[in-house]
Image (spheres, rainbow, N blue to C red):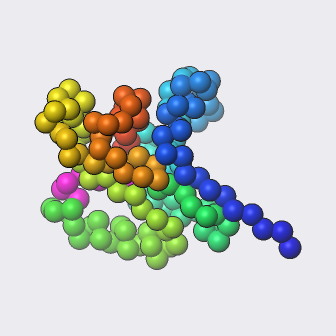
Amino acid sequence: MASYLVVVINNDANTVIGEHTSASADGRKSFTYMNPGNAPVGGADKNGVTAFLNSLVKPRTDIHAGAVQNMKFSKDMFSIYRDKLEILLSTYWQKGGAQAMLTVVSRGDLEAAMEHPELYQNLIVRVGGFSEKFINLPRHTQLEILSRTLY
């Protein structure tokens, strides 16, 4: 019996490769970033956080050695809606979720960090397999992170 492992961890290769790739059938425009790992390309997840998490548990975890599951949540999800977040993530794990790479930040904070990096020296985000200070990332990677749907 043969076996294999699928590894879908891209660091920021999705932005670099996307800059050299024509449009794709899913509606992604030419020469723009591709999806980060196993997560959808920014803005493509149009059916909400439950549908997003359900799609992430579809690949069989017994045949992959790792897959990037980038998720961007608002600060409110960890304070005001914490009970809903706990239910979402608990269900994700129960359904076989392999990992979760969380960024908790507002769109406004990311935009402000791009405009005034000196004020956001400690803003850390998940990129794809690693965390990094947002201001240290190349602009194309910052824009890809900014494009991710915020739940």
Image vertical order of residue 138 relative to residue 100, above or below: above
As rendered, which of 88 and 116 lies closer to the eye?
A: 116
Image vertical order of residue 99 relative to residue 13, above or below: below
Dividing the picture into quadrants, the one containing residue 23 is top right
Residue 56 position within the rendered picture, expressed as x and y whole percent measured from the top left: 51, 59
Q: Is residue 48 visible?
A: no
Quadrant assignment for the N terminus: bottom right
Q: Is residue 72 magenta?
A: yes
Q: Residue at 50% across / 27% down in the picture?
A: 32
Q: Can you name the residue that lies furthest to the bottom here? A: 94
Is residue 130 rendered to the left or right of residue 75? right
Q: Residue at 41% across / 29% down in the picture?
A: 140
Q: Is residue 46 visible?
A: yes
Q: Can you name the residue that lies furthest to the right here? A: 1
For the record, the magenta segment spans: 70-77
Q: Residue at 15% across / 62% down in the picture?
A: 80
Count of all numbered marks drawn on residues in the image:
0
Residue 44 position within the rendered picture, expressed as x and y whole percent measured from the top left: 47, 40
Residue 97 position within the rendered picture, expressed as x and y whole percent measured from the top left: 49, 68
Residue 120 position within the rendered picture, expressed as x and y whole percent measured from the top left: 18, 39
Is residue 5 rendered to the left or right of residue 37? right
Q: Residue at 69% across / 62% down in the picture?
A: 5
Q: Does the magenta stretch include residue 113?
A: no
